Image: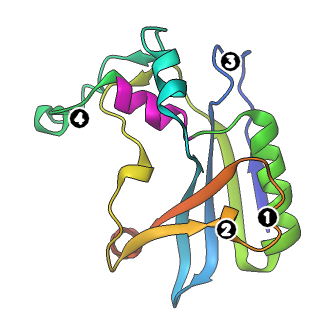
Amino acid sequence: MEIRFTEAETSPTFPRIYGIDAILRNFKGCPHLEITIIRHGQTKEEVEALLGKGLVGEPDPEVPKEVLVGATEYRALQCLLENFTKEEAQAFVDYVQERYADQVEAIMVGPLDIPIPLGAGPLAALPITKNSGFICFDKAENYPLPFAARAYFDFSLQDELS
């Protein structure tokens, strides 16, 4: 299993900036499936405590205006809170390496840029369909970490990437 862990170049202004992506060898018959791991279960209070702190910036100028309809600072902060601290990301990588190394081709960890753009939204809000859903690591027997971790996958997106 390949592990790539890119640390922030400077001291982060907010600790939960580390995103985690992975490539599974084979999941439900789909080889080389790309997944995005999120820290699941932020509370309304956690999000509200970050409002107005400058963690959300202007929207990406390349995003079409119609995509930004309904975009809010609150939703962008929900997205931000789906990321991990450096220590949480390392603990998750260690867990995957110990328990799932034979099923994972690669795991990549890297920092987000702060402020995140308005228009970002939480992956946890995406619908579950016949082609997409969540792998619930935190529901696995003997899951040892103190935070919930889920992985979003989308088979139809994978087909587009192939």
For badge 1, the amino acid type reads Tyr
Locate the C terminus by quadrant: bottom left
- Label 4 vs label 2: CA separation? 35 Å
The residue singled out by tag 2 in the image is 139
- The residue at 72%/79% (across/down) is 103
Query: Which label sits on residue 43?
Result: none
What is the secondary structure assignment of the residue under circle 2?
helix
Locate the N terminus by quadrant: bottom right
- Label 1 vs label 2: CA separation? 7 Å
Tags 3 and 2 touching, CB below 8 Å: no
Closer to the camera: disc 3 or disc 2?
2
For badge 3, the amino acid type reads Pro
The residue singled out by tag 1 in the image is 143
Taking the image as shown, residue 93 lies to the left or right of residue 161, namely right
**Percent x, y of residue 84:** 67, 38
Tags 1 and 3 touching, CB below 8 Å: no
- Residue 105's quadrant in the figure? bottom right
Closer to the camera: disc 4 or disc 2?
2
